[in-house]
Image (spheres, helix red, strand yellow):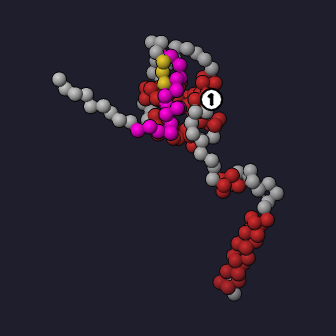
Amino acid sequence: MTEANPVFVPPSEFDAFLFASVGQDGNDRQLSVLSALARADVDPWHEAAELARLPGETATERLVSLIATVPGGLSTHPDPGTVAARLIALLPRKAAHPIAKTLAGKKLKGGSPTMIWGVFLVFLVLGAVFIVVYR
């Protein structure tokens, strides 16, 4: 008798998302996000990481289109947008870097004194370099 060699898959931060149910396939079996992405010939862990980086609405739209490409489709026809939004909510969200928030205009409406002085200093240095070089 040959002994089975179990495959160890380390837990990941995407497990809640990957093992969540998408619905039932054409044979009335529960279909997880993992199996749906695999059937669509997409690497589930890579795609989960990509979706986690995207803004929520964009990630939801992308997941809707991916689920639509699953061979055999889903036997139940709930609203795909609702299903995708529920699944995207299971992804870990990383807080945006403070500079990204600043560039998005979330922190500097009206300008902070530190930023104003920083911009002033940059122009001062560039002006001094210009004077020295083109004298």
Left or right of 111? Residue 9 is: left
Residue 58 sits in which quadrant? top right
Q: Position of residue 81 (x, y in %)?
A: 63, 25
Quarter of the image with the C terminus in it: bottom right
Look at 58% across and 15% down and name the residue there. 77
Residue sitting at x 79%, y 60%: 111
Q: Which region of the structure is painted magenta?
A: 10-25
Residue 4 shown left or right of residue 20 in the figure: left
Residue sitting at x 75%, y 54%: 107
User: Residue 18 magenta-drawn?
Assistant: yes
Residue beneath disc 1: 85
Q: In what quadrant of the picture does the N terminus appear? A: top left
User: 45 above or below 102?
Assistant: above
Task: Name the residue furthest bottom.
Answer: 135
Viewed as shown, does residue 76 lie left or right of 43?
right
Question: Which amino acid type is shown beneath numbered disc 1?
Answer: Ala
Mark 1 Cα-neighbour bin, 10 Å: few <14, some 14–19, many ≥20: some
